[in-house]
Amino acid sequence: MTEIENKLIVKPFAAIRPVPDLAQELVAPPYDVINADEARALVEGKPWSFLHISKPEIDLDPETDPYSQEVYDKGRNNFNHMIEQKVLRRDKKECFYVYQLKMNNHVQTGIVGAASIMSYLQNIVRRHEYTRPNKETDRVRQIDAVNAQTGPVFTTHKNSELIQVVIDRVVKGAADYNVIGDGNVEHTLWLVDDDADIIEITRAFEELGVIYIADGHHRSAAAARVAAERNAKISNPTGNEAHDFFLIVSFPETEVKILDYNRIVKDLNGYSTNEFLKKVSEICDIVPCDEAPKPTSSRNYAMYIDGKWYSFALSIEETEENSVVDYLDVSILSTKLLSPLLNINDPRTDPRIDFVGGIRGMAELEKRVDTGGWKVAFAIFPPTVAELMAVADAGEVMPPKSTWFEPKLADGMVSLLME
């Protein structure tokens, strides 16, 4: 690879996209936020829904193993069929795209591009989470079978005036399409095919020097594995093949919205409710609340147990031994309360703990405790994008289920064909 190629972080690509007239029917929620039954209900009367590609088990017997080769083959056949029927078509030129999400009063606008696998391996595209092997392998098999990356990785970058100038100019023009997705989120896409704009965006990412994975660690890890497997079959890999890049949408840090990711626990580790409350009160002051006290600042928490809400605050002493991860609110809760009192030492594997995305609200925590068989719930103030970047810059990882991003990117808006 040349010196310029080594610097390349994000490049333009010729996307596979829906024809405008069918975009509303085709665009679908991400494959991993709905189950097969929900997907089957969503595709009723929608033969061109992208769920036929991203969750192809919906077109097979409900008893079919979702990880069987038959499922991946069905996804490939459905993808190719939509291309043959000109429902999906490939752009003739390598371009960037501007992708805007609107959810209620929140708006975020970013760049769709192809990120370099080499940059990912060199930690220029930085991550902050571990992946689960089974989920990663599922994406490897899906990408390899379809021969395309159909689910974009959500990344974020430091604010860039160069990128913002291009975005501001592009969004003044007519959009290629605008669709209403899951949760009434508005998804709008513009093509960026002007050569000067393409050069400007490419250089802007090079000047940024680093971008951060927000959501999509399994997709990016899987893309890297597919690239390694395919390069192993090439006598002289250049590092610039189509499979050496992965699909991203990168948003400026100031527009990214992180919601809380809350915890529920199955039992009190042998304590009665009164005993547990007494133990917590020995660690911090707990205040009974008449209604759900959603945390509004860092180090403040809410707890729901036996039909009652409590608020409390936790702190941690600053020492040279502590890492940036130790100061995260989720880490402090684990260190001060979940581990010593409830004996939950590894949230990744302990079946006694589960996680509830903040998009579901405080009422969902009440519901899970009151009727779902869980004993206690904890609401946490979400981490900031700055904290996410600090963890990634330090080469560390956040505890599992630390971040919940909304709104979600849709599947089917753009796909990256690996040929």
Image (spheres, helix red, strand yellow):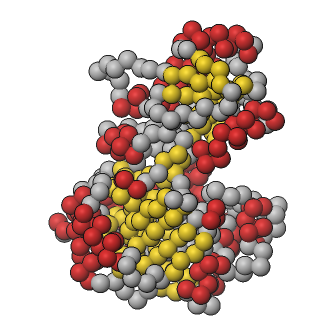
Left or right of 236 in this view: 128 = right
What residue is shown at x 70% (from left), y 10% (from top)?
Answer: 275
Residue 272, quarter of the rendered image: top right
Q: Is residue 166 visible?
A: yes
Q: Is residue 373 left or right of residue 247?
A: right
> How many labels sit on residues?
0
Residue 189 vs 8, above or below: the answer is below
Taking depth in this image into account, of 90 and 288 the one nearest to the observer is: 288
Q: To which quarter of the image does residue 40 belong?
A: bottom right
Q: Position of residue 223 (x, y in %)?
A: 46, 61
Q: Quadrant of the N terminus?
A: bottom left
Q: Quadrant of the C terminus?
A: bottom left
The picture places residue 358, in percent across and down from the top left corner, at 59, 44
Residue 257 in the image, given as x and y percentages of width and height: 47, 51
Residue visible at 82% across and 61% down in the picture? 63
Q: Name the residue furthest front.
A: 290
- Tell me what residue is drawn at x 55 percent, y 69 percent: 186
Res. 223 in view: no
**Residue located at (41% from left, 65% from top):** 109
Check the image and name the residue furthest to the left: 3
Rendering coords of residue 353 (x, y %): 66, 32
